[in-house]
């Protein structure tokens, strides 16, 4: 439900504040753009921009926060088991809210990079783009590890971009990429289930 609230509030802000009853804002000033002619020339003039560098820095920052700080330890502990964390003296509600704030901040950074680098404006959306759900899949494939997520994100990005050229280059429908991504998620999720079943069998054998 919160997704729809965020969608329609964002659309209202774009129509009423960022544009004059239009469907998109004015194009940003070149000095605020993240586009890079150098990066575009390296990738056959794609829309690659400096946001890729910002995302890599954000992944390293997230890794440091989760793995090297007390706050990160508490966030991971609450995520694994809220009840055990509570008995250990951790503030469960505080860590849940903090996790939401941090994840929202990172989502905001990602949205800002899309607006400042890829499109150079913001526009009204009739529905969800699905990028957030792709992020969940990337985190799952990356094993919730910052460096694994970087590799998973590159894989998903390559599949998504490649899908745009598949109909003309290989006469293959773009939906095939969605099938491949679904199969990847299925097998990764199945590995957790198989591991759980094997662990239970081992305990029963003992």
Image: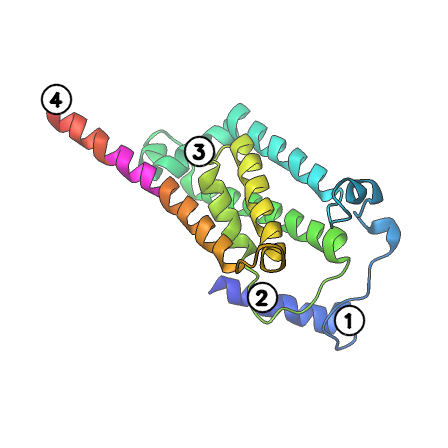
Residue 111 marker? none
Residue at x-position 70% and y-position 49%? 113
In the image, which is nearer the foreground, mark 3 or mark 2?
2
Residue 76 marker? 3
User: Which of marks 2 and 4 precedes in the sequence?
Assistant: 2
Displayed quadrant of residue 202: top left
User: Which of marks 2 and 3 precedes in the sequence?
Assistant: 2
Residue hosting label 4: 206
Residue 8 seen by the camera:
yes
* 10 Å crowding of disc 2: few (<14), some (14-19), many (20+): some
Residue hosting label 1: 19
Residue hosting label 2: 7
Q: Determine the CA span between mark 4 and mark 2.
A: 53 Å
Q: Determine the CA span between mark 3 and mark 4.
A: 30 Å
User: Which of marks 4 and 3 precedes in the sequence?
Assistant: 3
Displayed quadrant of residue 190: top left
Q: Determine the CA span between mark 1 and mark 4.
A: 67 Å
Tell which of 64 and 126 is nearer to you.
Answer: 126
In the image, which is nearer the foreground, mark 1 or mark 4?
4
Residue at x-position 57% and y-position 61%? 129
Question: Residue 167, image x and y in percent?
Answer: 58, 60
Q: Residue furthest bottom?
A: 21
- Residues rendered magenta in the picture: 189-196
């Amino acid at each position: 439900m919160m997704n729809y609230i965020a969608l329609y509030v964002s659309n209202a802000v774009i129509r009423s504040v960022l544009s004059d009853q239009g469907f998109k804002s004015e194009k940003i000033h070149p000095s605020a753009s993240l586009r890079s002619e150098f990066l575009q020339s390296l990738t056959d003039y794609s829309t690659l921009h400096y946001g890729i560098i910002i995302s890599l820095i954000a992944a390293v920052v997230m890794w440091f926060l989760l793995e090297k700080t007390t706050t990160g330890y508490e966030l991971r502990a609450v995520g694994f088991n809220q009840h055990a964390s509570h008995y250990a003296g951790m503030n469960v509600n505080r860590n849940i809210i903090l996790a939401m704030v941090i994840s929202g901040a990172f989502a905001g950074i990602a949205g800002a990079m899309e607006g400042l680098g890829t499109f150079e404006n913001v526009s009204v959306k009739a529905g969800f783009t699905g990028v957030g759900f792709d992020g969940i899949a990337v985190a799952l494939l990356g094993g919730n590890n910052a460096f694994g997520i970087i590799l998973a994100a590159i894989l998903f990005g390559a599949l998504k971009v490649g899908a745009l050229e598949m109909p003309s280059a290989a006469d293959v429908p773009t939906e095939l990429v969605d099938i491949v991504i679904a199969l990847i998620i299925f097998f990764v999720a199945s590995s957790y289930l198989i591991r759980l079943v094997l662990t239970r069998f081992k305990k029963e054998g003992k």
